Image (cartoon, rainbow, N blue to C red):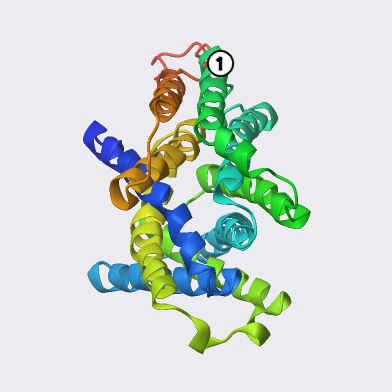
Amino acid sequence: MSAPSRTALIAAFGAIYLIWGSTYLGIRIAVESMPAFLMASSRFIVAGGIVAAFIALTRGFRATAKQWRDNAIVGGFLCLGGNGLVSWAEEKVPSGIATLIISAGPVFIVLMDWAVHAWSKDGSRGTRPNTLTFAGLGLGFVGLAMLVGPDVLATGVNGLDPLRVLGLLGATFFWGVGMMIMRYVREPAEPFTASGIQMICGSGWLLLASLATGELGRFDAAAITGRSVAAWAYLVVFGSLIGFSTFTWLMKHSTPAKVSTYAYVNPVVAVFLGWFVLHEAVSPRIFVAAAIIIAGVALITIAKNKKPASKPAAAPAPAAVPATQKAG
């Protein structure tokens, strides 16, 4: 797989930073009148179907049975375990508190990647984080706490549904597991083919969750508002077709630690969108918090996470013709 250009990487990071920063609001509006798991399921089946149809018409949809299986598992962790649980939790948990809990994601992901590195038999998978990475994680969390913490303290945390809070913690964990499988699976599918399979299969997992929680029995199509439908359409196009597919591509071309920085940047984007679109007040505290978060992301981005040194080539046995060195 050829390395992407710096421009492509910057554009991809910009997409998940900006687009996913707006999806928290989209999810919150969508679940006002749509059941969470059913909303997410319909969102992903439409987006995944469009991706698969486009690939089939332009170059042919090709995936092995193993690639379908692997991406069905990833889709379960990402779409159901990650996005589905966030959508379900946001029915009851205020967005500020949800954002703080979800911000634990980058820490989980860095530690999981470190565990993969430690358990890898040949040391070829995973990365060992260095001091700069942990410093960046710390700065990102401090900045995020400064960004939304005062609002959380003002509204209070009493009366939160403990199951929804547990769901948010579970979402960060399951999303991290899905990222690790996606990053290190052997014989992976082409990134956009993989994203199509993940969304289609993830939609199936979400539908099962909807059935298990009794959402279909409580569903009333007449109660869905135009506001929720507009938010759902936004999530299909921007959150899934563009954002999710870009995320899948980035996981093939960058490190989990760097990709996970979206969890710190998204709340900053959400705050400034509120200022720009809804004319919400922006205080000096927000600018300071944004600067701290950006500094933390910069540290994670420039950190050179340690990879194992390549094994020295064995000395060639005496022979008339010298042995050539095998490329790593």
Q: Is residue 45 above or below residue 287?
A: below
Q: Is residue 112 above or below residue 225?
A: above
Q: Is residue 322 left or right of residue 126?
A: left
- Name the residue beneath numbered marker 1: 130
Q: Does residue 235 show up?
A: yes
**Total number of numbered labels?**
1
The image position of residue 270, as x and y in percent, is 41, 45
The image position of residue 121, as x and y in percent, is 67, 30
Task: Give the residue drawn at x 51%, y 43%.
Answer: 183
Dividing the picture into quarters, in which one does residue 26 lie? bottom left
Dividing the picture into quarters, in which one does residue 240 lie? bottom left
Quarter of the image where the N terminus is located: top left
Please tell me which residue lies in front, 123 or 77: 77
Secondary structure beneath label 1:
loop
Amino acid carrying mark 1 in the image: Asn
The image position of residue 126, as x and y in percent, is 57, 31
Please tell me which residue lies in front, 7 or 184: 7
The image position of residue 154, as x and y in percent, is 61, 39
Please tell me which residue lies in front, 170 or 258: 170
Q: Does residue 60 show up?
A: no
